[in-house]
Amino acid sequence: LVTLLCYAGLVAIPDAYYQAAKIDGAGRWAVFRHIQLPKLKHVLTIAILLRFMDSVRIYTEVVVLTGGGPGNATTFLSIDLVKMALGQFDLGPAAAMSLIYFLVIMFFSWLFYTLMMRKEERSMRLRYLVPFVYILFLMLPIYWLVSMSFKTTNEILGGFSLFPQKFTTENYAKIFTDPTWYWGYLNSLAYVSLNTVISVAAALPAAYAFSR
């Protein structure tokens, strides 16, 4: 996917830029640095964000190959979350962990997008109206997680309710006092970073070769 996105971005660059660079006597590195890489800015932003979010969902490969071991060396947050929700059936702490996991992903995605797009124009705000409404619709499951994270497991299993009847923060206290969560967070962050960097580093030269 990253290779295809980069390839599409390279092919979409008008030939006029290459002709102007040839007239100026620019070499391949100069063309890549001053023409191709800036023109690939938006494509690379999308590719990196997609690769990042896809890497965060890692679960099956690790469970099949290592089972999270040896020790906690390959235990990711996704594995801890499944064990807590389906293995131990602690739905309240599992909802709290899911919410924290979601916020971590959102924070890093927002940070990267902001850094990449900080020089872009802030116009045409109406074009964001439809995506905003769509995102609000997608946030309904997130609200359900928030509501569950402040409920006890007995209340969750007892019946449906939009709001917690007995508001509690014990689920978050349990998550943040569990050292396994920190190991899972660090392992997930290291894997996602390496996976994203390696994917883009391998895909960009491949896309460049295909576009020539």
Image (cartoon, rainbow, N blue to C red):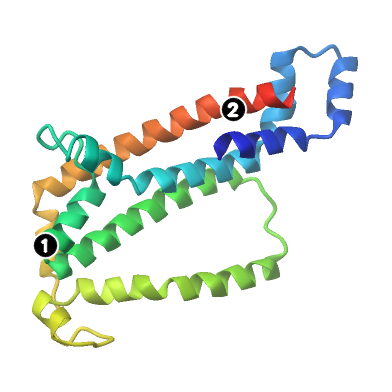
Q: Along the horizontal axis of the image, is 126 left or right of 46?
A: right
Left or right of 125 in this view: 179: left
Task: Specify the amino acid type for callout 1.
Answer: Ala
The residue under the point 43% across, 43% down is: 52
Which residue is found at the position 12% from the left and 32% from the top? 70
Mark 2 crowd level (few <14, some 14–19, many ≥20, 10 Å Cα): some
In 3D space, how far apart are the residues under numbered discs 1 and 2 (Cα atoms)?
43 Å
**Residue 117 against residue 134 in the figure, above or below:** above
The residue at which mark 1 appears reads as 173
SS under mark 2: helix
**Could you tell me if residue 102 is visible in this image?**
yes
Look at the picture and state if 56 lies above or below 34.
below
Residue 1: where, in percent of width, then height?
Answer: 56, 40
Q: Please tell me how crowded label 1 is: few (under 14), some (14-19), or many (20+) other residues with Cα within 10 Å.
A: few
Which residue corresponds to mark 2? 204
Q: Residue at x 30, y 34 (%)?
A: 190
Q: Earlier in the sequence, mark 1 or mark 2?
A: 1
Q: Are marks 1 and 2 in contact (CB under 8 Å)?
A: no
In the image: residue 16, left or right of residue 46: right
Q: Secondary structure at mark 1?
A: helix
Residues 137 and 70: in front is 70
Up-down relation of residue 158 to residue 90 (above or below): below
Name the kind of residue labelled 2 in the image: Leu
> Which quarter of the rendering shows the C terminus?
top right
The residue mark sitting in front, 1 or 2, is 2
**Residue 61 location in percent, x, y?**
29, 40
Give x and y (percent) for residue 102: 34, 58
Q: Quadrant of residue 15?
A: top right
| Residue 112 tag number | none
Residue 88 is situated, as x and y percent measured from the top left of the image, at: 9, 61
